[in-house]
Image (cartoon, rainbow, N blue to C red):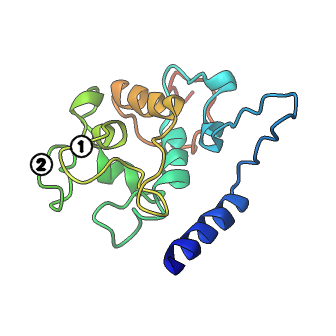
Amino acid sequence: MGRARVLLAALVAAGACSSSPAKPVDAGYDYVWVDPRTDVCGEGGATPAMPPFELVQQIFNENCVSCHAPGADLNLAQDVSWANLVGQPAPAAEACGGVLVVAGDPNASYLYQKVTSPTPCSGVRMPRGEFGSAPPLPDCVLAILHDWIAAGAPGPSADGGADSGGDGSTD
């Protein structure tokens, strides 16, 4: 009985510290929580037609590198992530193998499967989150990853993404 009370108290306290404010019963308004991970998406959740790698790296920085850093099976840190992903086999710990990113084919890319499938062939859906599971990435973030892979998984631009011309030219 004592354990149940401690657990209940912990759950109540955790709820009090939640980043989502509670909705008052008779507030007279609707509160809509917006996932902060959508900040990487365009206005209204729109995604660019051909996302640059710098946008993909921003997704990795905000959602992945806390675990996938130097020393991990897969390092998604700045300056090494593209080379560690495109055309590379999945880490040996992943029993089903496959290629992490198959340029031009999101559905054949193990990375895309790991972030979209609720039951990937090995392990769990990514990102895992602080306590073992996190909500899936928002649809607009998944669309950026999909469209980047479908566009051939282009690498980082020489200017770090500063070229807003969008045609990849260097003139």
Left or right of residue 150: residue 134: right
Instruction: Tell me: residue 53, above or below residue 50.
Output: below
Res 23 → quadrant: top right
Instruction: Tell me how many marks there are.
Output: 2
Residue 114: which quarter of the image?
top left
The image position of residue 94, as x and y in percent, is 18, 56
Q: In the rendering, which numbered label is found on residue 80?
A: none
Q: Are marks 2 and 1 in contact (CB under 8 Å)?
A: yes
Quarter occupied by the C terminus? top right
Above-or-below relation of 99 to 62: above
Is residue 131 shown left or right of residue 35? left
Q: Residue 96 has which mark?
A: 2
Q: Residue at x 72, y 61 (%)?
A: 16
Disc 2 versus disc 1: nearer the observer:
1
Residue occupied by mark 1 = 120
Q: Residue at x 67, y 58 (%)?
A: 15
Question: Of callouts 2 and 1, which one flags the residue occurring earlier in the amino acid sequence?
Answer: 2
Q: Can residue 157 be spotted in the picture? A: no
Q: Residue furthest bottom?
A: 2
- For the residue pair 166 and 87, the one nearer the viewer reads as 87
Question: In the image, what residue type sits under mark 2?
Answer: Cys
Q: Quadrant of residue 74?
A: bottom left
Q: Is 133 displayed left or right of 83 in the figure?
A: right
Image coordinates for residue 93, horizontal then vertical, percent: 17, 62
User: Image point 39% across, 29% down: which residue?
Assistant: 146
Disc 1 marks which amino acid? Pro
- Determine the residue positioned at 57% across, 45% down: 160
